[in-house]
């Protein structure tokens, strides 16, 4: 990744697909998650990400698998398999469905401890342009930089077994969080005053 300076945030929290459900017909979700058998069937969650150039998605991993589809613009990824977790400095900050990192890829030179750990990691680089799709296996650490104004789709999928096992644990943790029993003051979902 070239050096960059983040300028603004993505429009990601507004669920455009819920507001305009007819858009789902154009996305051909089932073609990316074909059902080979009932046990292989995927339950999916889709999110649209829109933003200008230089937007950054911080280093994190997601619990579900993700088909990342680029509609407009170009994005650059750095990806690290789950076996590199020891070098990713997992954060205590709560985020439903994801594990965040204390590593800020935009400010690595100012993060001595994190930089020392990050330098030991082995990962790959991917460039995704309009019309491309990138499969990101569950628990794969990744950070993304938008090189130009972009529109992207993240299609997250889990089998019924994955939902019943890991999904049940994530749901219990989320309930505890919303009941103020777990990380209520250290999360991505509650605005700080």
Image (cartoon, rainbow, N blue to C red):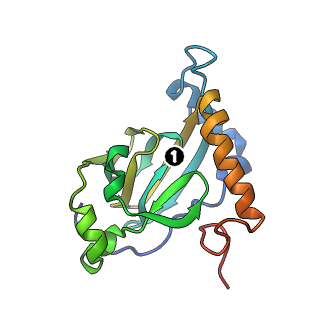
* Residue 60, quarter of the rendered image: bottom left
Q: Give the vertical position of 74 relative to 53 (above or below).
A: above
| Left or right of 146, for residue 192 | right
Say if residue 158 shows up in the picture.
Answer: yes
Question: Residue 92 at x, y = what percent?
Answer: 52, 67
Crowding near pointer 1: few (<14 within 10 Å), some, many (20+)?
some
Quarter occupied by the C terminus: bottom right
Question: In the rendered image, which residue does mark 1 sit on?
Answer: 153
Say if residue 74 shows up in the picture.
Answer: no
* Residue 121, quarter of the rendered image: bottom left
| Left or right of 163, for residue 86 | left
Q: Nearer the viewer, residue 69 or 141?
A: 141
Q: Nearer the viewer, residue 105 or 14?
A: 105
Which residue does the image show at 59% across and 33% down from the upper left?
A: 162
Question: Residue 126 at x, y = what percent?
Answer: 28, 47
Q: Give the vertical position of 70 relative to 111 (above or below).
A: above
Outermost residue, bottom direction? 193
Which residue does the image show at 31% across and 75% down from the upper left?
A: 107
Q: Secondary structure at mark 1?
A: strand
Q: Nearer the viewer, residue 27 or 4?
A: 4
Quarter occupied by the N terminus: bottom left
| Left or right of 1, for residue 96 | right
Q: Give the vertical position of 104 relative to 41 (above or below).
A: below
- Tag count: 1
Outermost residue, right direction? 179
Q: Nearer the viewer, residue 10 or 73?
A: 10
Question: Residue 102 at x, y = what percent?
Answer: 41, 68
Q: Give the vertical position of 20 relative to 11 (above or below).
A: above
Which residue does the image show at 23% across and 68% down from the upper left?
A: 116
Which residue does the image show at 53% across and 45% down from the upper left?
A: 63
Question: Residue 172 at x, y = what percent?
Answer: 71, 50
């Amino acid at each position: 990744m070239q050096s960059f300076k983040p300028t603004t945030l993505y429009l990601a929290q507004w669920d455009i697909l819920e507001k305009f459900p007819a858009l789902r017909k154009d996305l051909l979700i089932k073609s990316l998650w074909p059902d080979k058998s009932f046990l292989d069937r995927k339950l999916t969650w889709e999110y649209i990400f829109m933003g200008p150039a230089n937007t950054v998605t911080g280093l994190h991993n997601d619990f579900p698998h993700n088909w990342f589809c680029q509609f407009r613009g170009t994005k650059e990824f750095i990806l690290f398999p789950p076996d590199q977790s020891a070098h990713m400095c997992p954060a205590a900050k709560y985020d439903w469905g994801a594990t965040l990192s204390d590593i800020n890829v935009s400010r690595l030179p100012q993060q001595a401890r994190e930089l020392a750990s990050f330098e030991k990691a082995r990962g790959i680089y991917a460039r995704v342009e309009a019309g491309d799709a990138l499969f990101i296996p569950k628990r794969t650490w990744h950070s993304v930089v938008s090189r130009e104004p972009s529109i992207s789709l993240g299609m997250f999928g889990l089998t019924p077994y994955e939902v019943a096992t890991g999904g049940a644990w994530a749901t219990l943790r989320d309930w505890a969080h919303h009941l103020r029993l777990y990380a209520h003051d250290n999360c991505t979902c509650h605005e700080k005053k």
